[in-house]
Image (tube, helix red, strand yellow):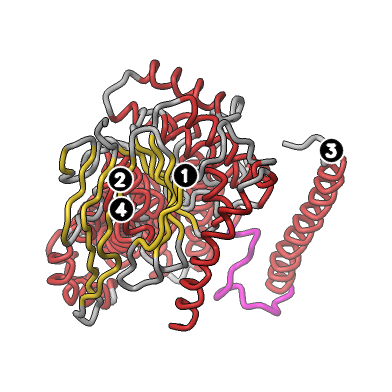
Amino acid sequence: MQQSDLPVRRTARARARRRRWIVHSLQVAIAVVILGGWQLGSNTGFVDSFFFSKPSDIAARAYDWIKTGYILDDLAVTLQEAFYAFVLGSLAGGAVGFLLGRVRLLAEVFDPYIKMLNALPRVVLAPIFLLWFGLGISSKVAFGFTLVFFIVFFSTFQGVRNVDRILVDNVRMLGGKRRHVLRHVLIPSTATWIFSSLHVSVGFAIVGAVVGEYLGASQGVGYRIAQSEGTFDTTGVFAGMTILTLVVLVIDLAVNRIERRLLRWKLDEHMT
Amino acid sequence: MTTPSVELKSVRRDFVTPSGDTYPAVRDINLVIPAGTFVSIVGPTGCGKSTILNVVAGLLPPTEGQVMSFGKPVSGLNAHTGYMFQQETLLPWKTIVDNVRLGLTMRGVSSKAAKRDARSWLKRVGLAGFEDRYPHQLSGGMRKRASIAQTLITGPEVLLMDEPFSALDVQTRQVMENELLQLWQDSNTSVLFITHDLDEAIALSDEVLLLSSGPGSSIIGRFDVELPRPRDLMTVRDQPGFTEIYTKVWSQLRQEVMKTYAAI
C-alpha cells in the first residue's frame, strides 16, 4: 500500500532470490553426491549391484518402460484406483464428518466406534478386502477409501466444530436464515479444514492403491514392483519406485495449485 | 410521545455455570432508548454489558422481564437491530464488497444492485478502492469501517455496538468515532453503545447509563449529556461542561471499579 517501502522491498526481493539460488544449488549438489556415489560404488563393486542396482540401469529401465508403454497401462490403473478412493473417501468422510459435527448426540454415540476403527492399522484390512472384492480395482479402491475417509472425516468434524460462533451470530443479525448460515459460514469454514488435508488425503489414496496392488493384483504399478521383486530384479523395483515418485510429485504440484486457488483469501499479498 | 426504539422492563438474565449453579448476569434492567438517540452503557469489565446488548438483539432471551422494540415485544431475533460485535466478524473468505453486501444478498436483493449499494457504502466509510481485497489484507481500522458498512447497509433502526473500537489505537479510534457520529446524524438510527471508556461514552452520547459491577449488575446511574451537536471528537473534550459531567459520572464509576477489583 505504501509507496515508500518499494526500494526496501526490492532489495529484500533480491536477497530472497539469492537465497533461493543457494538452496537450489545445494539441493542439486546433494542429488549429485548421492546418485554419483551410488553409481561409482556399484561400478567399482563397493556396492553390491545385485541388491542395490545402479542409477544408470534404473534410469534406462524406467525410460524403457515408459517408451515401450509397458508401465503406462499400470500407471493408469493405479491412478484410477487412487482417484476413486480419493473421491469416494472424501465425499463419505466429508458427509459423515459434517453430520457428526452438527449433531452432538450422534457424535457422542459414535465416538468409541470411530476411535476403534481409526485405531485399527488399516493395512490389515487389505487381505480381507482382497477376499471380499477380488483382485481387481475395487479391493484397492476400498482399501484407499478407508485411509482417505478418516483423514477427511476428522478434518471436517474439527472444521464444523470450530466454526467461529461470532461469525454465525453476525450473519444471523444481518438477517441470515439457517440456509444462509450454512452457505456463507459453515460450509466455507469447514472447506478450509478439508482443503488443508488435501495433500495428505491425495497421498493416502495413492498409498492405498499401491499397497493394495502390492498385496495382490493383476495390474498396476504396485503389482509391477511386486513382480520385479519376485524375480530378484532390483532394477525393476527401483524403476517402479522412481516412476511412481515422479508421478506423485506432479500430482502434489497440481494439488498445490488447486489449494492456492481455493484458499486465495488466506494468502498474503506478497505470497500470490 | 413516540414509541421508543427499545424498551427493557425489569429484565434479568441468568447464566448456568458448568457445575449447574445459576447466577444472575444482569438484573432489574429498565431502559428506554427513544428513537434517534445515542445511549451508552458504561461499566467495569465483566459487568454484563454485552449481555444487555444480546438481550436487546434477541440473541439471548431474558430470564425474566420484557424486551420491547417499537412497541412490540421481541421474540426471536430483533429485526430492527443491527449489531456490531467487539470481535472481527467479516467473513475471511469473502472480499470486502461481498462482505458488505451480504445483508442485502440474504434479503434477496439482486447481486448487481447489492454490489452497487455496497460500493457506495464503502465509499462513505472511506474504503473506495478496497472492494476486492480480503479482510486480512486490510488494517484493523479498515476492517472496522467495513463492518460498519456491513451493519448499516440493511438500514437497521437500532444500532447495537459492543465496544466496537476497543481494539484500535487512540488516533484511529477518534477518527472512527467522528465518522460514526457523522453516519448517525445523517440517519434516524438509535444507537446503544457499550464501552468501558467513560471518555468515549460522554463524547458520543445523549445519555450515559452506569452499570454496577457484576454479578447481578444493574443500572445505578443515568446521566444526560447536553453537549451541543454536531460534536467534533477532536475538540469535544475541551468544551465547558465536558469535564463537569465526566467528574460526576467518574466519581460513581470509580466506586464500581474498585468493587470489581476488590472482588478479584
Evaluate if marks 2 and 3 touch, with contact meaning CB atoms under 8 Å apart. no
**Badge 4: few (under 14), some or many (20 or more) residues near its Cα, within 10 Å?**
some
In the structure shown, which secondary structural element does the residue marked by tag 2 occupy? strand
Q: Point out the stretch of residues depicted in magenta.
A: A44-58
Q: Which mark is residue B32?
A: 2
Q: CA distance from mark 2 to mark 3?
A: 51 Å
Marks 3 & 1 on one chain: no
> From where the camera sits, is residue A49 visible?
yes
Tell me where residue B246 appears, x and y as whole percent. 58, 56
Instruction: Confirm whether the magenta stretch covers residue A114.
Output: no
Write down the residue under mark 1.
B92
Mark 1 vs 2, N-terminal side = 2
In the structure shown, which secondary structural element does the residue marked by tag 3 occupy? loop
The disc numbered 1 marks a residue on which chain? B
Of the residues shown, which amino acid type is indicated by label 4?
Asn
Compared to A222, does A77 lie above or below? above
